[in-house]
Amino acid sequence: MFNNRIPVFNNQHSIDALNLLLELKQYGPPDINAYGEQEINQAVKNGIDMFDCVIPTRNGRNGTCYTSNGKVVIKNACHKEDFSPLDESCNCYTCTNFSRSYLRHLFNSGEILALRLLSLHNIHFYVSLMEKMRKAILNNKFEKWYKEFYGTYSENGGTAAFLIQ
């Protein structure tokens, strides 16, 4: 049986791989495996809506968190005395109950709770991202949302500036 899963890389290869995947739609629904937050919007923009990914949990376990303003590396010293939530606009369990400082302490102390809380937050971020995209599509405003999101996300530490066209 034909498998439509292909790896997507974090550069111009992403766009080329997405274009190839769109050509393969005739063999079954396209499914992207191993994507990041950069590729997910580009994929949705191109009509792909099925994903399989370990990035939110893998990056959470390694101290990288996704926020509405870009990526945060929680183990960095700048968070040592930062008592704000991981993401001010997030309502997940992690953001409503723990500060960046405490999450940094847990992570740098090797506490397994840190890995779980950061993974939980990242999964919430991805689910929320898909909800926002779905709403924008239903309101026929995806292009506007796409440019606004990546304008903010890229300027503040995100890595998707190359996808804005």
Image (spheres, rainbow, N blue to C red):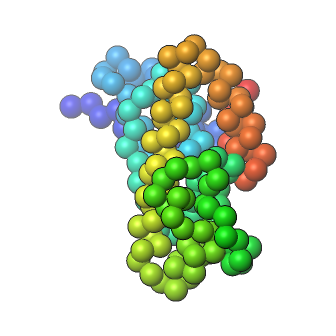
Name the side, left or right, on which 28 lies relative to 9: left
Residue drawn 71% across and 77% down? Answer: 81
| The C terminus: image quadrant | top right
151 to the left or right of 133: right
| 73 vs 46: above or below | below
Q: Position of residue 7 (x, y in %)?
A: 45, 44
Residue shown at 57% from the left, 76% from the top = 102
| Residue 63 visible at all | no
The percent position of residue 79, horizontal first and vertical second, equals: 69, 72
Above or below, 65 against 4 in this view is: below
The residue at 57%/13% (across/down) is 140
Looking at the image, residue 149 lies above or below residue 135: below
Q: Indicate the quadrant where residue 76 lies.
A: bottom right
Task: Residue at 49% x, 45% y: name it.
Answer: 126
Query: Residue 103's image quarter?
Result: bottom right
Looking at the rendered image, the quarter that the N terminus falls into is top left
| Residue 108, x across and y down, in percent | 56, 82
The image shows residue 7, relative to residue 135, as above or below, that is: below
Query: In the orientation shown, which residue stands out farthest toward the front?
Result: 97
Q: Nearer the viewer, residue 42 or 141?
A: 141
